[in-house]
Structures are given as C-alpha cells and as structure tokens.
Amino acid sequence: MKSYLFILLFAFFLPVSTCADIYKYIDNEGVLHFTNVLTRNSSEMNFFVDTSFGRTQDFYSTSKFDSIIRKAASKFGVDFSLVKAVIKVESDFNPRAVSSKGATGLMQIMPFNFQSLYVEDPFDPVDNIMGGTYYLGKLIKKYKNKLPLALAAYNAGPTSVDTHQDIPPYFETQRYVKKVMKAYNIYKGRI
C-alpha cells in the first residue's frame, strides 16, 4: 500500500512534459512492475493511473498542425475538433511517435494501412493527418455519424466493432473512446 501511495505522489509532482498513463503488471517471477509503455499482452497489463490530470504536454504544440488539420478536415468532411482530439490522444502531437504495435506518426497509422490511406511518409505531418483523417471520415460514414463507434473502429478496427455491434469490450478501446470524446468536447468548447 505504501508503494502505491509513493507512486501516486511521485506521479503528481512529475513535470507536465513527463506525465503519462502508468500501467502495472506482474512478471513470471511474481515481481510487480510499473511502466508508461504498453509493451506486453494487454491482458497481462492493467491500467494503474493517468498522471496527466487533463493537462497538455508543452513539449509538442497543440496548434502547430492546425492548418493541416483544417485542410484535411475540410477535404474529408470531418470536424476539425475531432481530428485534433484524435491526434491528442493518439500521439499527443508528437509527429515522430511510434507505438509498441508499430503505429506511427500523429494519427498513429499502422504500416499495413499506409498504401490504402495514401500515406507515403507516416512521419510527415501532412501525409499522416491526411491519411488518418481520410480513414476517420470513412469510419464516420460507415457508422452513420455515431462517433463512439467510429472511434472504436479507429482504435480496434472495424471488424471488432462489427462483431460486437457496439464498442468492443476491450478496456483499451473503451478508455480510448472516452478520452477522445473528452478531448473533442474540450476543443469544441463544451467543457
């Protein structure tokens, strides 16, 4: 119990630029570990704490890519604030972000989707935002403007959403949808 308290206090006093979600898992030898990187099977790792407390990291500007987001949003008929919210949750505006599963860039596009989304350089903000927004727009149309379903499909894939005919019962996906919707409402000025 004391170690949990120490970690929570430590996380609270971290500088904003180092805040992230913290996960915990027990290894094969029974040792408890804490990490900010999802590198293990998601069934083995459990969410422990979100240390960001709704703050945005200062390291990557949240407005640096606004002109590209506006162009992509207009071209593919997706709300500017929604694209921005997806980027916030996916990469926190880091154009060089790479996930443990290999998703890359601002909108965390998987390599097997590059060609179908017309992404030549996933680390190029224009390519990445255009490709990710194009895909998000297709999902919004597929799910008849039901944003939670479109976001769940963006995160877990349309097959998972179609199979469950709802947001899949995956902790990561359910949490993802909530985080994007919260960011979306903040960018829209609803919160």
Image (spheres, grey):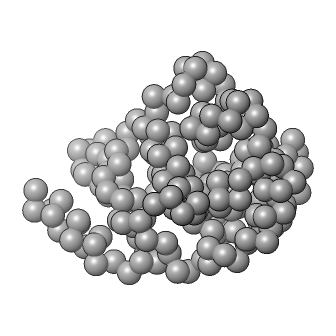
Rendering quarter of residue 169: top left
In this picture, is 9 found above or below 28? below
Residue 185 higher or lower than 153, as above or below: below
Q: How many marks?
A: 0
Q: Is residue 126 left or right of residue 161?
A: right
Image coords of residue 149 (percent x, y) = 60, 33
Please tell me which residue lies in front, 65 or 117: 65
Visible in this render: residue 156?
A: no
- Residue at point 36%, 59% (across, down): 50
Residue 137 place in picture, x, y as percent: 77, 43
Point out residue 147 in the picture as x, y percentages from the top left corner.
Answer: 61, 39
Q: 55 or 38: nearer the eye? A: 55
Q: Determine the image quadrant of residue 20.
A: bottom left
On the rendered structure, is 126 left or right of 181? right
Residue 63 seen in this snapshot: yes
Q: Residue at x 57, y 55 (%)?
A: 184
Q: Is residue 38 left or right of residue 138?
A: left
